[in-house]
Image: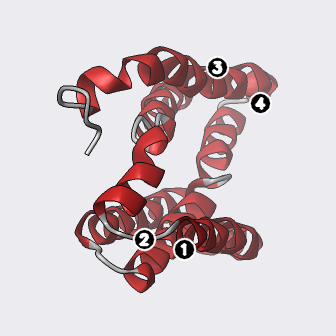
């Protein structure tokens, strides 16, 4: 199997694993009803995420160009792990804001580095004309998994009628 084909298969798995966010419909309930934040604080936390994503997008591309695509993807995974742990253990606004900033750093680091790794792999084999089709397939993979998974999320995340 060629490196480009292997990287495409890994990209499919990566996109499904990192972008099929079955917990998103429950985030507001978790932060407000379970952790005690109010709706305004929840909105501020979401603002931290989106603002951080925008501010980190260009610098993260520089990181991927300087240290390489794979190390950038690993760094993105590390930020995702830190953000997830903070999110799971947090009980106040500032911890959740820090968690969202870490998750935004992860999003910014991975965004583009995964596609660039695929393109570089294809270009090394003279197959760059296949990039658009493969990138489209990678996008479709997580959209399909979300379309199937989100309606089933209650089966995985809700015990009885209480999403707590």
Q: Is residue 68 visible?
A: no
In terms of depth relative to the viewer, which is nearer, 28 or 105? 28
**Callout 2: 10 Å neighbours few (<14), some, many (20+)?**
some
Task: Determine which residue is flagged by label 3.
Answer: 137
- Secondary structure under the numbered disc 3 in the rendered image: helix
- Secondary structure under the numbered disc 2 in the rendered image: loop
Q: Picture quarter containing residue 88?
A: bottom left
Position of residue 129 measured from the top left corner of the image (x, y, whole percent): 81, 24
In terms of depth relative to the viewer, which is nearer, 159 or 18? 159
User: Is residue 54 shown left or right of residue 114?
Assistant: right
Q: Give me the C-alpha separation between circle 3 and circle 4.
A: 15 Å
Q: Nearer the viewer, mark 3 or mark 2?
A: 2
Identify the disc placed on residue 128: 4
Task: Please report contact status of discs 1 and 3: CB closer than 8 Å, yes or no.
Answer: no
Q: Give me the C-alpha separation between circle 2 and circle 4.
A: 48 Å
User: Is residue 114 shown left or right of residue 160?
Assistant: right
Q: Picture quarter containing residue 135?
A: top right
Position of residue 30 measured from the top left corner of the image (x, y, whole percent): 36, 54
Task: Determine which residue is flagged by label 2.
Answer: 37
Task: Please report contact status of discs 1 and 2: CB closer than 8 Å, yes or no.
Answer: yes
Task: Determine which residue is flagged by label 1.
Answer: 41
**Callout 4: 10 Å neighbours few (<14), some, many (20+)?**
some
Q: Give me the C-alpha separation between circle 1 and circle 2.
A: 6 Å
Give the residue drawn at x 78%, y 26%. Answer: 132
Give the residue drawn at x 47%, y 34%. Answer: 20
Position of the N terminus by quadrant: top left
Q: Give me the C-alpha separation between circle 1 and circle 3.
A: 37 Å
- Secondary structure under the numbered disc 1 in the rendered image: helix
Q: Can residue 159 be seen in this view?
A: yes
**Callout 1: 10 Å neighbours few (<14), some, many (20+)?**
some
């Amino acid at each position: 199997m060629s490196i480009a084909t292997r990287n495409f298969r890994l990209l499919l798995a990566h996109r499904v694993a990192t972008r099929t966010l079955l917990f998103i419909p429950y985030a507001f309930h978790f932060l407000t009803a379970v952790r005690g934040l109010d709706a305004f604080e929840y909105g501020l936390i979401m603002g931290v995420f989106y603002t951080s994503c925008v501010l980190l997008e260009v610098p993260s591309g520089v990181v991927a160009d300087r240290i390489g695509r794979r190390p950038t993807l690993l760094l993105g995974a590390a930020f995702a792990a830190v953000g997830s742990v903070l999110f799971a253990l947090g009980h106040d606004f500032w911890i959740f804001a820090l968690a969202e900033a870490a998750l935004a750093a992860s999003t910014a680091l991975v965004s583009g580095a995964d596609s660039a790794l695929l393109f570089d792999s294809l270009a090394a084999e003279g197959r760059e004309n296949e990039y658009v089709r493969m990138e489209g397939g990678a996008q479709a993979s997580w959209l399909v998994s979300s379309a199937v998974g989100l309606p089933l999320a209650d089966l995985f995340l809700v015990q009885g009628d209480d999403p707590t």
